[in-house]
Image (tube, grey):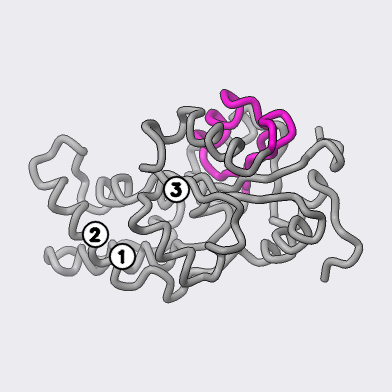
C-alpha cells in the first residue's frame, strides 16, 4: 500500500533510528558508564536494537536493572551526562535521508521531528547537525504533557507545521511511533533501517507501509526531479 504523493502535504520523523543514526554515540556513552562501574562493555550489535527505547532502556539492558531499582535514577542521570558530553561525534542523518529532506524542501512540504528524547538533548544535537533551522517543528519528549505512544505530540506537530493529520505522514522505527501516528490520524511508515529488536515484527505494527531505506520514503511523498 502506498499513498498518493499529492495527498501528503507534510512529513514528521522520529529522531533516533529514523532521521538520524545516533547509535554509535549512545553506545559509547553506555559503555563508558559500564566501565566506570567496573563492568565489561556490551557489543554494539546488542546495543543498537535498543536505542529507540532511550536512556532508560539502555541502562536497563546494560545493568540488568528495572526502573524501580534503587540505583536506576543515578545510573540514568550519569548516562545522560556522558552522552551529553559527546552528542554528535559520530551521529549523522541516515544515508539517503538528506535527499528526502531536500526533496521535501524543494516541494514546499514542511517536515518536522517528533521524538521522546528530552529537549535538553534534542535541541543541542539538532543544532550541531544543522537541522534545527530546517525543521518546521521540533517536538521533544517533554514538549507536551504526554510522550509517544500518546497522539498528543504528533497532533501538536501537525498544528505546528500547519498540515492536517490526514495529509501528514509520520515515519518511525518504533511501535510507539506507529501507535501515536495512527491515534493522531496520520499515515504511518515503519523505518526498517532503524533500531528494531529481533523479537519485534514491524510488519505487524499496523503501519500503512514499511521502508527498507530512506529513499523509499520518496515513493510516498513524490520526488522532485531536481533532487540529487
Q: Position of residue 215 (x, y in %)?
A: 75, 57
Callout 1 environment at 10 Å: few (<14), some (14 to 19), or many (20+)?
Answer: many
> In the current view of this chain or complex, which residue is farthest to the bottom?
89
Which residue corresponds to mark 3?
A: 52
> In the current view of this chain or complex, which residue is farthest to the right?
225
Which residue corresponds to mark 1?
A: 83
Q: Please state the extent of the stretch shown in magenta in the rendering.
A: 163-192
Task: Say what secondary structure mark 2 lies in.
Answer: helix
Does the stretch in magenta take in 160?
no
Ranked by sequence position, the earlier of labels 2 and 3 is 3
In the foreground, 183 or 56: 183
> Where is 51 relative to 160, above or below?
below
Is 104 situated left or right of 195 in this image? right
Quadrant of the frame with the N terminus: top right
Q: Are marks 1 and 2 in contact (CB under 8 Å)?
A: yes
Q: Are marks 1 and 3 in contact (CB under 8 Å)?
A: no
Residue 38, image quadrant:
bottom left
> In the current view of this chain or complex, which residue is farthest to the left?
70
Is 93 situated left or right of 56 in this image? right
Q: Position of residue 13 (x, y in %)?
A: 59, 48
In the foreground, 50 or 131: 131
Find the distance from the CA under tag 2 to the CA under tag 3.
Answer: 15 Å
Residue 40 visible in image:
no
Which residue corresponds to mark 2?
A: 79
Task: Tell me what residue is drawn at x 48 percent, y 38 percent.
Answer: 199
Find the distance from the CA under tag 1 to the CA under tag 2.
Answer: 6 Å
> Where is 58 relative to 144, above or below?
below
Amino acid at each position: 500500500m502506498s499513498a498518493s504523493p499529492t495527498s501528503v502535504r507534510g512529513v514528521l520523523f522520529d529522531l533516533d533510528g529514523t532521521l538520524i543514526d545516533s547509535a554509535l554515540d549512545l553506545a559509547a556513552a553506555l559503555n563508558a558508564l559500564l566501565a566506570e562501574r567496573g563492568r565489561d562493555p556490551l557489543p554494539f550489535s546488542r546495543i543498537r536494537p535498543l536505542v529507540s527505547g532511550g536512556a532508560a532502556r539502555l541502562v536497563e539492558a546494560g545493568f540488568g536493572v528495572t526502573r524501580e531499582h534503587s540505583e536506576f535514577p543515578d545510573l540514568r542521570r550519569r548516562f545522560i551526562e556522558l552522552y551529553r558530553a559527546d552528542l554528535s561525534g559520530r551521529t549523522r542523518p541516515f544515508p539517503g535521508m538528506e535527499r528526502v529532506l531536500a526533496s521535501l524542501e524543494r516541494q514546499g512540504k514542511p517536515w518536522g521531528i517528533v521524538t521522546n528524547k528530552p529537549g535538553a538533548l534534542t535541541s543541542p544535537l539538532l543544532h550541531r547537525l544543522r537541522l534545527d533551522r530546517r525543521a518546521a517543528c521540533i517536538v521533544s519528549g517533554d514538549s507536551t504533557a504526554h510522550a509517544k505512544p500518546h497522539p498528543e505530540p504528533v497532533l501538536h506537530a501537525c498544528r505546528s507545521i500547519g498540515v492536517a493529520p490526514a495529509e501528514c505522514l509520520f515515519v518511525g522505527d518504533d511501535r510507539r511511533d506507529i501507535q501515536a501516528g495512527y491515534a493522531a490520524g496520520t499515515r504511518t511508515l515503519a523505518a526498517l533501517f532503524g533500531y528494531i529488536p529481533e523479537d519485534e515484527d514491524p510488519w505487524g505494527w499496523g503501519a500503512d507501509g514499511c521502508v527498507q531505506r530512506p529513499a523509499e520514503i520518496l515513493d510516498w511523498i513524490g520526488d522532485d526531479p531536481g533532487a540529487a
